[in-house]
Amino acid sequence: MRIVLATDAWEPQVNGVVRTLTRTVAECRGMGHEVDVIEPSQFKTIPCPTYPEIRLALGAEEEIRERLRAFEPEAVHIATEGPIGIATRRICVEWKLPFTTSYHTKFPEYVSARFPIPVQVGYAYMKWFHKPSGRLMVATPTLRD
């Protein structure tokens, strides 16, 4: 199976999301699947405000569009809600290409703690982002709730 994993969190970042995703990719490849990882180092990036270790991709949508067209994935998984995730989501919705998503971090709380943005706004964004997904994967019951 040809699988695309679109993520804004990837090596050299060291965190639980990256560990989970790299392990998942290794397991999929070990089972014989071809996995194309779309990640920030493949694009021009800027540091994330208040968390410069995370790099945010700029202007990635057209290249992602070309990669999806060339790779012809049988499955698309969008692992994060950042610029790469948003671009991949937009393309999948436009092309009516089924995809799955995952929710790894209480991102609304993270944003609200750093910027004057109410947590409810963050959760409205999360609902909007994940709604067209065929399945939403979470790591814990707390994140599910």
Image (cartoon, grey):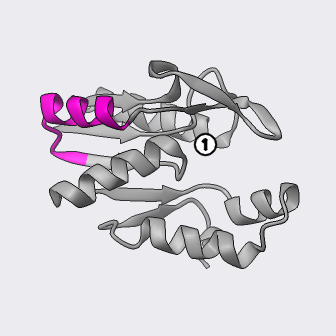
The image shows residue 47 at horizontal and vertical percentages of 70, 29
The image shows residue 131 at horizontal and vertical percentages of 40, 73
- State the predominant SS element of the stretch in magenta: helix
The image shows residue 76 at horizontal and vertical percentages of 28, 47
Front residue of this view, candidates 72 and 75: 72
The residue at 79%/37% (across/down) is: 51
The residue at 66%/41% (across/down) is: 16
The residue at 25%/39% (across/down) is: 3
Front residue of this view, candidates 118 and 140: 118
What kind of residue is marked 1?
Val
The image shows residue 57 at horizontal and vertical percentages of 53, 32
Q: Is residue 99 left or right of residue 131?
A: left
Image height of 79 relative to 5, above or below: below
- Residue located beneath label 1 in the image: 17
Q: Quadrant of residue 61?
A: top left
Within-10-Å neighbours for mark 1: few <14, some 14–19, many 20+: many
The residue at 29%/38% (across/down) is: 4
Q: Is residue 39 left or right of residue 50?
A: left
Image height of 71 relative to 82, above or below: above
Q: Quadrant of residue 28?
A: top left
The stretch in magenta equals 61-75
